[in-house]
């Protein structure tokens, strides 16, 4: 090994130039998920993995960047997402790409691209990843946020819609979160067209009282008025025509079946005649999950949402294929988990701390650490510290049950010192037998704590 001379490193705090650089921050609406929060994120992820394994969903990961037309065609030109929220740009090679604002369109693209139509249907997939929308940042709303979602592709049976709502609800239950499913049917594109006309006829005479944005919605996408949070529109819509009265027979039957299945498995739901969801691809069933609360007036953010999208795969160039799915906003789930757990989670328990003295001790300590780690012990160290006092303080702070001490003498003798941190006693053992000795001591200690 050749060692080249490196330039002399500057001491910490030593000025590099007269001007100090301005510290940078994360991009607005995007944030770091710091170690202190990882406990909750891991909990949310493991719950997703467990429930998807038990319902036999396979994990899929798709790229963050997709071709822009995927979302323009899939999500819909006149939706808020496509009109104003996408992070789109042209690459140096001239490709028009977008950072995914949602994942359903990408999964349909993957289903078509990989010929999943030839697999037994429905194909059941789940994903976990971050999405990007250039929305106004506010509480519970970020520009990079995380979604866990499930899709069932290739089946139009109402039982699929019900199973998805059940899975989403069970996921929340498994995290101790009580939720209610708000549900509606928005029928086929044809029945929706008739309803759209009825809505325009209802709202048009009232347009003088509407904001400019809502006037635009009335013209371009009147269904979007129904999920407006503007109090004027909320009041107007009380008397508005309801989509259930415009549903075709087959959609009505489909919806009835979904509700019957939900009754059967005891999923609490609430019919919401004005729930339409913000993406164009939905057909028939749409649903959202809200935290269960007695306060009906409390304004809440949905924790997740989904529905059926029977036309999407065809819009994206595949064969006509019915499908349904949902996605859950993990940032909001984590925030609820944090609010619930008032005491921070306990730190992980450490079995053994490896302390070292001198250069030869440190070298051996590295190898001993590996030996203990691969034998299944929870091991810790402070290899960059040379003071034995500092190392013992760290071992105590981490709550290590034993400390292995190795110095020059022990290296020469082929031994190690095992210190019992509770009793304060020390013992010299053959280095070859270290792991074996520690295992014995662990068994002894846990037997003592039981008796
Ligand atoms: P959507 O399909 O747009 O309704 O999104 C599904 C879920 O993702 C929502 O119910 C939210 O929980 C979550 N979500 C959507 N947009 C954001 C955002 N900007 N920030 C945080 N979570 C979001």
Image (tube, rainbow, N blue to C red):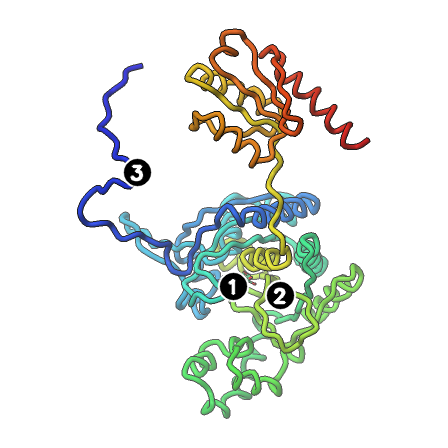
As drawn, is 132 to the left or to the right of 265?
left
**Do residues under tags 1 and 2 come within 8 Å of each other at their CB atoms?**
no
Respond yes or no on whether mark 1 lies under 8 Å from ligand 1: yes
**Gap in angstroms between the C-alphas marked 1 and 2:** 16 Å
Q: Which mark is residue 288?
A: 2
Mark drawn on residue 238: none
Drawn side of residue 2 relative to residue 150, left or right: left
Q: CA distance from mark 2 to mark 3?
A: 52 Å
Report x, y in % for residue 314.
52, 58
The quadrant in which the N terminus is found is top left
Residue 148, percent from left and from top: 57, 52
In this view, 229 is above or below 151: below
Name of the residue lying farthest toward the left: 18
Frontmost of labels 3 and 1 is 3
Q: Which mark is residue 12?
A: 3
Q: Residue at x 65, y 47 (%)?
A: 52
The residue under label 1 is 140
User: Exactly how many numbered labels are in the figure?
Assistant: 3
Q: Nearer the viewer, residue 245 or 80?
A: 80
Task: List x then y, in percent, for residue 438.
Answer: 65, 20
Query: Closest to the observer: 2 or 447?
Result: 447
On screen, 144 above or below 275? above
Q: Is residue 14 above or below residue 287?
A: above
10 Å crowding of disc 3: few (<14), some (14-19), many (20+): few
Residue 71, image quadrant? bottom left
Mark 2 or mark 3: name the one nearer the start of the chain.
3
Q: Nearer the viewer, residue 195 or 438?
A: 438
Q: Is residue 439 left or right of residue 90?
A: right
User: Element under label 3?
Assistant: loop
Q: Is mark 2 within 8 Å of ligand 1?
A: yes
Give neighbour class at mark 1: few <14, some 14-19, many 20+ (Cα, 10 Å): some
Query: Which residue sits at x=26%, y=31%?
Result: 9
């Amino acid at each position: 090994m050749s060692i080249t001379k490196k330039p002399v490193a500057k001491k910490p705090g030593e000025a590099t130039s007269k001007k100090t650089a301005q510290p940078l921050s994360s991009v607005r609406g995007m944030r770091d998920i710091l170690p202190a929060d990882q406990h909750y994120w891991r909990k949310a992820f493991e719950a997703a993995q467990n429930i998807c394994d038990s319902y036999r969903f396979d994990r899929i990961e798709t790229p963050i960047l997709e071709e822009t037309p995927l979302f323009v065609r899939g999500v819909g030109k006149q939706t808020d997402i496509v009109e104003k929220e996408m992070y789109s740009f042209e690459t140096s090679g001239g490709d028009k790409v977008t950072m995914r604002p949602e994942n359903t369109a990408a999964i349909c693209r993957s289903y078509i691209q990989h010929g999943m139509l030839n697999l037994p249907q429905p194909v059941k997939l789940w994903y976990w990843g971050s999405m990007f929308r250039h929305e106004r940042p506010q509480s519970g709303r970020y520009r990079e946020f995380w979604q866990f979602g499930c899709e069932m592709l290739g089946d139009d049976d109402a039982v699929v819609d019900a199973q998805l709502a059940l899975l989403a609800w069970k996921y929340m239950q498994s995290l101790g979160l009580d939720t209610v499913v708000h549900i509606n049917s928005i029928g086929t594109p044809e029945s929706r067209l008739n309803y759209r006309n009825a809505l325009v006829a209802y709202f048009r005479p009232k347009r003088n009282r509407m904001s400019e944005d809502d006037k635009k919605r009335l013209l371009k996408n009147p269904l979007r008025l129904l999920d407006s949070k503007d109090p004027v529109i909320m009041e107007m819509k009380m008397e508005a025509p309801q989509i259930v009265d415009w549903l075709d027979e087959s959609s009505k039957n489909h919806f009835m079946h979904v509700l019957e299945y939900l009754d059967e498995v005891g999923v609490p739901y609430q019919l919401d005649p004005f729930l339409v969801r913000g993406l164009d691809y939905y057909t028939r069933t749409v649903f959202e999950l809200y935290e269960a609360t007695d306060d009906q007036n409390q304004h809440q953010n949905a924790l997740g949402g989904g529905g059926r999208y029977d036309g999407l795969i065809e819009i994206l160039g595949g064969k006509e294929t019915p499908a349904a799915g949902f996605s859950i906003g993990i940032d909001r789930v984590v925030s609820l988990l944090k609010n619930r757990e008032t005491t921070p989670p306990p730190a992980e328990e450490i079995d053994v701390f490896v302390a070292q003295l001198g250069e030869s001790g440190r070298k051996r300590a590295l190898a001993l650490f590996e030996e203990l780690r691969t034998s299944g012990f929870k091991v810790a160290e402070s290899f960059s510290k040379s003071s034995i006092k500092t190392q013992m303080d760290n071992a105590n702070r981490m709550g290590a049950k034993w400390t292995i001490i190795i110095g020059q003498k022990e290296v020469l003798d082929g031994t190690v010192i095992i210190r019992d941190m509770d009793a304060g006693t020390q013992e010299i053992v053959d280095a070859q037998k270290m792991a074996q000795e520690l295992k014995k001591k662990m068994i002894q200690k846990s037997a003592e704590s039981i008796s």
